Amino acid sequence: MRTIVTLACMLSVRASFTTPGVCYRRSHRSAACSAAVPPSVSLAAGMVGGAIGVGVAYPLDTLKTKTQSRVTRASSNPLALAAEIIRTEGVAGFYSGVSSTMTGQAIIKGIVFLVYEAAKAALSAFAAGDDPGFRILIIAACISGAVGSLVVTPVERIKCVMQAGEASAYDSPLACIAVVVRRDGWYGLAFRGLGATLLREVPAYAFYFVSYDLVKDALLGSEAVAAPLVPLIGGAVAGAMAWIPVYPIDVIKTQIQVELDDGDESECSVLATTRRLWQSGGFAAFWDGLGPKLARAVVNHAVTFYVFEQICGLYRTWT
């Protein structure tokens, strides 16, 4: 894990990058660049890759959520927690809410890619440039994260509630939705944790796209790694680098979203939750579950980008 983070940090000194769907004119990358496919293909590839990636890494995400919530588990050691889940809940305990999360992740990725492409095109037209520049790409990525947060918030609310509880607590995601709506209302389902989600998603997408494309550009340029491994390595680095800077915000968001039926809305705010975490655990409380989260992010996004690139590659081959 340290090697992946170090590689991304070393690459971050480079001045220019591209993202899926964008490519500067570099001859060594022209064959592999995702710009060769239309936005609709990138959108579909992102949806499929996002759903498959989150499904593969879901058990690690469950460990992260249970560690962060500290609602049902006393241990914060990932291995001890995993053993306890198997003993008390069985394998099903790792997959509470997986179906709704995969569906939601497909929708999220679809919206994010759609908004990203639209924002990039609009900003490029406004700047009257042939190719989007560095700042345009960053702004487009941040806009996509902001809009995607509106979908991420209710999807992760259900995911967090189901993961934090026992495997048998809810018969299905729909049953969990019914409980959340009954106790918190539709507003609580759709918007509880939105502020923390925005604080997390907006910078995370900037780190995400930057890290992936820097690694991809470096590896394709050096030809030191076989082409099929490039999206796996790039996705692994992107996943780690997208989460490390915003992880404390994710801990705060989880704390906000796992609770049900808090009478005082002010106690569910980002500042109030931050204060409670600091009082209960100090600095370390904001990093609970980081190990499982990084492991999950590496697996999830390596798979996501691999599937994304494979689907784009198939389209280019067929056409």
Image (cartoon, rainbow, N blue to C red):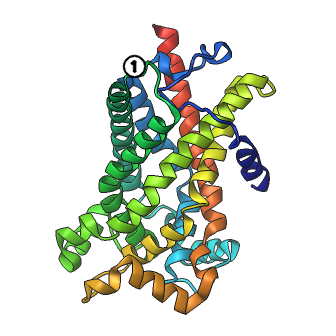
In the displayed structure image, the side of residue 117 where residue 94 appears, left or right: right
Q: Where 141 sits versus 271, above or below?
A: above
Residue depicted at x 68% and y 77%: 77
Q: Position of residue 72 (x, y in %)?
A: 49, 83
Residue depicted at x 51% and y 23%: 34
In the displayed structure image, the side of residue 139 where residue 243 appears, left or right: right
Q: Position of residue 316 (x, y in %)?
A: 50, 13
Name the kind of residue labelled 1 in the image. Answer: Pro
Q: Quadrant of the N terminus?
A: bottom right
| Structural crowding at the residue carrying mark 1, measured as other residues with C-alpha within 10 Å and reported as few (<14), some (14–19) or many (≥20) | few
Q: Quadrant of residue 88?
A: bottom right
Kindly state the secondary structure of the residue where label 1 is placed. loop
**Residue 166 in view of the camera:** no
Q: Nearer the viewer, residue 15 or 194?
A: 15
Badge 1 is on which residue? Answer: 38
Q: Where 186 sits versus 76, above or below?
A: above
Q: Quadrant of residue 150?
A: bottom left
Q: Quadrant of the C terminus?
A: top left
Residue depicted at x 51% and y 85%: 277
